[in-house]
Image (cartoon, helix red, strand yellow):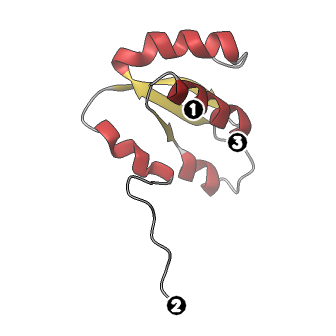
């Protein structure tokens, strides 16, 4: 049996981090809640802001107990706009 092929442009996990890896990024959200993280990433995506989740694998190392927060990163130039969007929509955004 041959493995299923991904559609062109599909990625998973930290591979998305490669979208612009040489440019400065900042954490716009830190959380241990995967639902909030997913919602925030989708919200930013709808507004045309690319984001990447950092520390996904580090949080798995802790046994998926939720001790290590994951970071939602955006490009430095998108930080202010992303921060405002998340403050308005996600109470946990800092």
Residue 30 at what x, y percent from top left?
Answer: 60, 28
Q: Secondary structure at mark 1?
A: helix
Whichever of callouts 1 and 2 sits on the residue coming sooner in the sequence is 2
The image quadrant where one finds the C terminus is top right
Q: Residue at x 64, y 18 (%)?
A: 93
> Which residue appears farthest toward the bottom when viewing the image?
1
Residue 32 at what x, y percent from top left?
Answer: 69, 37
81 or 55: nearer the viewer: 81
With respect to residue 55, does 93 lie above or below? Answer: above
Disc nearest the viewer among 1 and 3: 1
The residue pinned by badge 3 equals 67
Q: Which mark is residue 41?
A: 1
Few, some or many residues within 10 Å of mark 3 (<14, 14–19, 20+): few
Residue 50 visible in the picture:
yes
50 or 59: nearer the viewer: 50
Q: Residue at x 43, y 31 (%)?
A: 50
Residue 84 at what x, y percent from top left?
Answer: 56, 9
Left or right, residue 8 beside residue 39: left
């Amino acid at each position: 049996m041959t493995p299923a092929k991904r559609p062109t442009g599909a990625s998973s996990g930290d591979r998305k981090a490669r979208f612009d890896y040489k440019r400065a990024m900042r954490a716009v959200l830190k959380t241990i809640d995967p639902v909030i993280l997913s919602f925030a990433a989708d919200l930013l995506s709808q507004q045309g802001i690319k984001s990447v989740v950092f520390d996904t694998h580090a949080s798995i190392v802790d046994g998926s107990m939720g001790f290590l927060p994951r970071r939602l990163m955006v490009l430095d130039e998108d930080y202010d706009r992303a921060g405002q969007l998340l403050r308005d929509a996600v109470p946990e955004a800092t």
